[in-house]
Image (cartoon, rainbow, N blue to C red):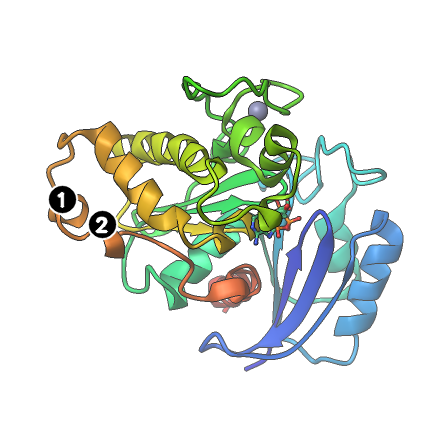
Amino acid sequence: MRIGAIEAGGTKFVCGVGDEHGNIVDRVSFPTERPEPTLERVIDYFRDKKVEAIGIGTFGPIDIDPSSPTYGHVTTTPKPGWSGFDFLGTMKRAFDVPFGWDTDVNAAAYGEAVWGAAKGLDSCVYYTFGTGVGVGIFAEGRLVHGLLHPEGGHVLTRRHPDDTYEGFCPYHGDCLEGMAAGPAIERRWGVKGSELPPDHPAWPMEAFYIGQALASTIVLLSPKKVILGGGVMHQKQLFPMIREEVKRNLNGYVAHDAILKGIDDYIVPPGLGDNAGLCGALALGLAALRVQS
Ligand SMILES: Nc1ncnc2c1ncn2[C@@H]1O[C@H](COP(=O)(O)OP(=O)(O)OP(=O)(O)O)[C@@H](O)[C@H]1O
Ligand SMILES: [Zn+2]
């Protein structure tokens, strides 16, 4: 079986072909430009690939309501040319196959539930801490949508008592994204996160923000696994700090062994590693094919 997968990011696009077991057999990647030239490269890539379906996990916000006249469009992004662009429609006009369509983080959550760290579970939450903060939610065996789609990067946070940084979110200032995405670290400390040593005070402060967001997510959604990905999470020393912050915030209230005894196996990096996004898109494509047939 050959399924197409598109991981559409704000900085780069990754396209690939995979099978029903989650194996990626071919992939390309190129920078995200304006929508028309970018999609031209995507369409060129898939032209001779003979895929039976295509899954798209994309940056957003996007319209995922099938009854909406703008279903399949990118909605309000500041990225030049993309606001209002009919992403899914452009792809459908080029390929007569079933399409899966969801946010990049919902796709990653789904991929992790099918093949990764949450394999076999009927719920998980996937966070990415990168240029922004995104949250994908898989609950009771399906991806969560709603009015639009979850935007858990913008939950409000309690400030760290020693933090004077104002936050960079243009809408909320010091929401989670404003305080904990990669650019917040860089602006707060004056250097990129990748250049800060593992014992720098940036990391306990980062864990403070991530830990409180996760504690809120755990009481709200009760996910069976919490998966943390994105560039910032390449700092592996964050994981134990975040787990401690979660325990401190919950303070014994969620009395489940997953948290009390097994938190190292509960808050984890993506099982699919840096393939989480592309495998997620692959899983969406596969699901679209199954719905149709
Ligand atoms: N090793 C690292 N340590 C700390 N921060 C890092 C590291 N690698 C990347 N980052 C930060 O992560 C951000 C980039 O995130 P990522 O690599 O996930 O790419 P992205 O796809 O552009 O992000 P997004 O998913 O939000 O669109 C930058 O702000 C960068 O400084
Ligand atoms: Zn915000």
For the residue labelled by badge 2, is the local secondary structure a helix, a strand or a loop?
Answer: helix
Where residue 38 sits, quadrant-wise, is: bottom right
Name which residue lies at 51% across and 78% down: 23
In the displayed structure, 147 sits above or below 109; it is above
Taking the spot 34% from the left edge, 41% from the top edge, the residue there is: 242
- Foreground residue, 267 or 82? 267
Task: Bin the neighbour count of mark 2 within 10 Å (Cα to Cα): few under 14, some 14-19, many 20 and up.
Answer: some
Asked whether disc 1 touches disc 2, contact meaning CB atoms under 8 Å apart, the reply is yes
In which quadrant of the rendered view does residue 182 lie? top right
The residue nearer to you, when weighing 238 against 70, is: 238
Query: Looking at the image, which is closer to me, 236 or 256?
Result: 236
Which quarter of the rendering shows the N terminus? bottom right
Which residue in the structure is indicated by mark 2?
263
Q: Mark 1 vs ligand 1: CB under 8 Å? A: no
In this rendering, position of residue 258 left or right of residue 92? left
92 vs 258, left or right, is right
Q: Which residue is mark 1?
A: 260
Determine whether 111 is above or below 32 in the image: below
Looking at the rendered structure, the secondary structure element under dot 1 is helix
Residue extending farthest right: 37
Q: Position of residue 269 (x, y in %)?
A: 40, 57
**Disc 1 from disc 2: Cα separation:** 7 Å
Between 262 and 49, the residue placed more toward the observer is: 262
Callout 2 amino acid: Ile
Can the viewer see residue 125?
no
